[in-house]
């Protein structure tokens, strides 16, 4: 081997190592705010980043109002009975077994309430399953205990593992690894080495399945939760409207390391996504891939 060829190969190896190590470890995407993230002591929902999430949060609020009104009404009735129909206030209690008017009311009223709730909840449910024309398709496969993601339009796929082993805890090595990947220490157990990356406002068709047992892909800020079932391909969609990092978890008990199956999605601008797509295709494809990014003009 000639000296020139040797140094050329060494230089190529060093560059490849740098790309796949330092720069690629952070997937070239920095400066994103963690938008969809659980907070200690939090009682409310995460920021709704999609139309689906806004619908679900509104429905939850509406149903809670109905629950609150019914609970208040029943409480008032109980207090009324306790005060005015106790043995001291009502020495001669009435004795009857039927009251047709009341029986009709307590039969018809719940029916009308349920019809009202259903008239709002069913369209929201159907909206999650009626997928509009999509800009991007991502196939998600749940495994024990990590996720695999495929971008079939661009012919590459990758696995996504939680940063750290879980059982060892937040060690100095795990802290360093979180920093290398651009995550904060409080994102331990949420962050993954390879995140799903999607462009902002793009309609993403999500195909979810599993390779072994039932898993469930869930991102609260997107209002998305879809079971991955072996031998079945379930579909849903989302269109994230706010750039940032979003976290989720496997939400179906799937074995001993179920708690160590986090989900990370980065929502970025179209330009950042296009640049990531080129790097991802060449990093994860089995063969070198050339991607032509469609013009937005």
Image (cartoon, rainbow, N blue to C red):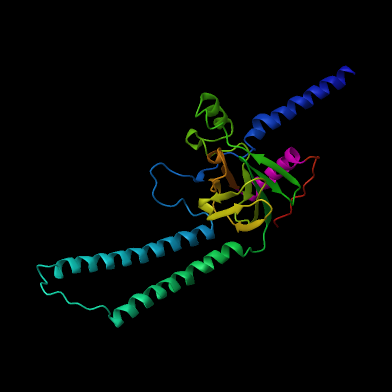
Q: Is residue 92 left or right of residue 25?
A: left
Placement of the N terminus among the 4 image quadrants: top right
Query: Which percent across, then down, holds residue 104?
Result: 34, 80
Q: Kindly identify the residue that appears in the image at 69 percent across and 41 percent down.
A: 158
- Write the residue at 57% across / 62% down: 128
Q: Residue at x 70, y 45 (%)?
A: 277
From this viewpoint, which residue is outermost toward the top? 3
Query: Does residue 28 sit above or below 151 in this rendering?
Result: above
Residue shown at 72% from the left, 27% from the top: 17
Residue 284 drawn at (x, y percent): 73, 39
Residue 203 appears in the figure = no
Viewer-closest of 22 and 87 = 87
Does 276 lie within the magenta span?
yes
Image x and y of residue 15, in percent = 74, 28
**Location of residue 85 (image quadrant):** bottom left
> From the viewer's perspective, is residue 170 above or below residue 119?
above
Report whether 30 appears left or right of 281.
Answer: left
Quadrant into which the C terminus falls: bottom right
Could you say which quadrant of the image residue 21 lies in? top right
Query: Where residue 110 sits: x, y (%)?
Result: 38, 73
Q: Which region is colored magenta?
A: 268-285
Q: Nearest the camera: 75 or 63? A: 75
Prevailing secondary structure class for the magenta stretch in the rendered image = helix
Q: How many marks?
A: 0
């Amino acid at each position: 081997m000639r000296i020139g060829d040797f140094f050329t190969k060494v230089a190529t190896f060093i560059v490849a190592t740098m790309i796949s190590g330092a720069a690629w470890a952070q997937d070239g995407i920095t400066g994103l705010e963690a938008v969809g993230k659980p907070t200690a002591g939090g009682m409310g929902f995460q920021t709704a980043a999609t139309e689906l999430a806004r619908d679900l949060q509104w429905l939850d609020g509406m149903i809670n109002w109905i629950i609150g009104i019914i609970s208040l009404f029943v409480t008032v009735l109980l207090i009324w009975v306790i005060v005015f129909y106790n043995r001291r206030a009502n020495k001669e209690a009435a004795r009857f077994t039927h009251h047709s008017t009341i029986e009709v009311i307590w039969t018809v009223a719940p029916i009308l309430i349920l019809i009202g709730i259903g008239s709002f909840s069913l369209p929201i449910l159907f909206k999650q399953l009626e997928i509009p024309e999509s800009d991007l398709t991502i196939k998600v496969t749940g495994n024990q205990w990590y996720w695999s993601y495929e971008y079939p339009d661009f012919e590459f796929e990758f696995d996504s593992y939680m940063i750290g082993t879980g059982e060892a805890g937040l060690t100095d090595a795990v802290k360093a690894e979180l920093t290398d990947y651009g995550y904060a220490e409080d994102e331990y157990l949420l962050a993954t080495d390879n995140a799903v990356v999607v462009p902002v406002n793009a309609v993403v068709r999500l195909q979810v399945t599993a390779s072994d047992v039932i898993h469930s892909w869930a991102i609260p800020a997107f209002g998305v939760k879809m079971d991955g079932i072996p031998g079945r391909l379930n579909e849903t969609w989302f269109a994230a409207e706010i750039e940032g990092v979003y976290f989720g978890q496997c939400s179906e008990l799937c074995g001993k390391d179920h708690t160590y199956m986090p989900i990370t999605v980065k929502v970025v601008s179209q330009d950042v996504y296009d640049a990531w797509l080129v790097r991802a295709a060449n990093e994860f494809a089995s063969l070198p891939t050339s991607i032509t990014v469609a013009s937005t003009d």
